[in-house]
Image (cartoon, rainbow, N blue to C red):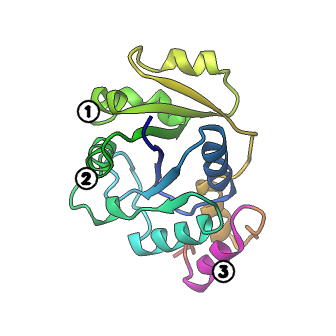
Amino acid sequence: MGRRVGVFGGAFDPPHVAHAALARAAVDQLALDELRILPTGDAWHKSRTLSPAGHRLAMARLAFADLPRVVVDDRELRRAGPTYTVDTLRELLAEQPGVQLFLVMGEDQAAALTRWHDWETVVALAVIVVAGRAATPGETRAALPPQARFQPLALPAMAASATAIRSLVGSGRPIADLVAPGVASYIDRHHLYQQP
């Protein structure tokens, strides 16, 4: 068998403790040689404007710095035009022939998978790994297209969400329990998520 490489993308606006817990669980439970963290570039599916790419990349590097076998990969931020997961998977396979890819996502993303650009190729190129919150693995599996190779990821329920964190910062409330200390300092230093 080739190297086992996980792919975990997202806006990471900001990255928080649940993202780090998911990354740690993926490396451990999937016996990954490496987990690539990919802050999204031009997110075709996001209705809101994301924070500038440089800030999201810097925060991701701070949030995941202490996790072994985790690498922050900026390729999607450097790509012109819309960011599609299928392009990233193809690039990784070209760079590392024989690699086995594991695409890590939450249940909300899994439920929307068949609306992704070229989703049929996505499920052909990577094992779909779904971090469960409440649903059982059987329910999650049923929501995926039948041709998808599926692997559940056990993750404890965590209250952190990027939307809630942005709201807390905007209203001047503390976020110390929800993000890594370096991320909290970065948000404060750069006045991110402040109300206009």
The answer to which quarter of the image holds residue 70 is bottom right
Q: Residue 119: x and y, percent? A: 31, 30
Q: Which stretch did the figure color magenta?
A: 178-191
Which residue is painted at 44% across and 68% down in the image? 51
Is 43 drawn above or below residue 129 in the view shown? below
Disc 1: which residue: 118
Q: Is residue 111 left or right of residue 166?
A: left
Which amino acid, mark 2? Pro
Viewer-nearest residue: 165 or 84: 84
Q: Which mark is residue 185?
A: 3
Q: CA distance from mark 3 to mark 1?
A: 39 Å
Q: Residue 26: x and y, percent? A: 61, 43
Q: Earlier in the sequence, mark 2 or mark 1?
A: 2
Q: Earlier in the sequence, mark 3 or mark 1?
A: 1
Foreground label between 3 and 1: 1
Crowd rating for badge 3 (residues with CA inside 10 Å; few <14, some 14–19, many 20+): some
In this view, the residue farthest toward the bottom is 189
Is 25 drawn above or below residue 67 in the view shown? above
Examine the structure image and report whether residue 187 is included in the region drawn in magenta: yes
Disc 2: which residue: 82
Which residue is painted at 33% across and 35% down in the image? 116
Q: CA distance from mark 2 to mark 1?
A: 13 Å
Q: CA distance from mark 3 to mark 2?
A: 30 Å
Name the magenta segment's main secondary structure.
helix
Which amino acid, mark 1? Asp
